[in-house]
Each structure stands twice: as structure tokens, then as C-alpha cells.
Amino acid sequence: MDNGDVVGKTFVALRDVNAKSIVILSPRVSDMRDVVVPAGEVLKVVSTHDDMVSCRPLRYAALEEQLVTPETRAHAGYKGYGLIIGRAVFDDDCAPHAEGADARAE
């Protein structure tokens, strides 16, 4: 996968995808935990790094309760979450999403 070619594009999870949910609550406090992005979810690539892909699910709000703990969501500094997926996992478990395709992008 070429870094510049995928940023801003959408991909569908072909199967349940292991990822990390990351939340920055303040300059000194963050929360990161292992999560599973369900098969069929559509992810928009925000950025890429050497061995990681940062994404935002199109159903961001619908998945928030599942992917972020209640304690984290209740924290005064909470402003949202991001997903980090290992590059090899992303390449194996996600495919380009065709516009208008039947996926969980509602």
C-alpha cells in the first residue's frame, strides 16, 4: 500500500479487524486499548505511518460506545477517539470500498 494513495479513501473490513482505540485526554493522559472493528464497517484512512494506518469509521458515533469505555467517555478531556490498525492487518483484512456498495456506512 502506498501511503499517499490511500489517505482520504475508504476501505471495508472484510472480517473482524483487530485495532487499537486511542484517545488523548490531555497532554499527559491518554487511553489506548485493543478493540475489534466488526466485519463490514467502512473506514476512512486519515493518515499512514511506517507500520500503521490511522482511520475513522464512517459510523463513528454508532461505534463509539462499543470501542471506548464509559469511564473514558465520561472524562472531562474526552473529545473523541481514533483507530490505529497495523499495516499488515489492514492490508490483509480491509479492501477498497466501492461507493454505493452494500456495507455498514449508514
Image: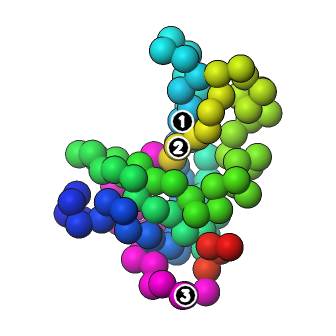
Image quadrant where one finds the C terminus: bottom right
Front-lying residue, 41 or 76: 76
Residue 48's label in the rendered image is none
Q: Secondary structure at mark 1?
A: strand
Q: Is residue 54 visible?
A: yes
Horizontally, residue 12 falls left or right of residue 92, namely right
Q: Secondary structure at mark 3?
A: loop
- Over which residues does the magenta segment extend? 84-102
Which residue sits at x=70%, y=48%?
A: 64
The x, y position of residue 96, in whole percent, is: 40, 77
Residue 101's label in the rendered image is 3
Q: How would you rate the neighbour count of disc 3 (Cα within 10 Å): few for under 14, some for 14-19, many for 20 or more?
A: few
Disc on the earlier residue, 2 or 3: 2
Residue 22's label in the rendered image is 1
Front-lying residue, 73 or 87: 73
Front-lying residue, 33 or 11: 11
Answer whether residue 90 is magenta in the image: yes
The x, y position of residue 89, in whole percent, is: 41, 59
Image quadrant where one finds the N terminus: bottom left
Which residue sits at x=23%, y=66%?
A: 5
Vertical side of 73 occupied by 63: above or below: below
What's under tag 3, amino acid-wise? Ala
Q: Can you name the residue that lies furthest to the top here? A: 28
The quarter holding residue 77 reads top right
Which residue sits at x=27%, y=45%?
A: 49
Residue at mark 2: 82
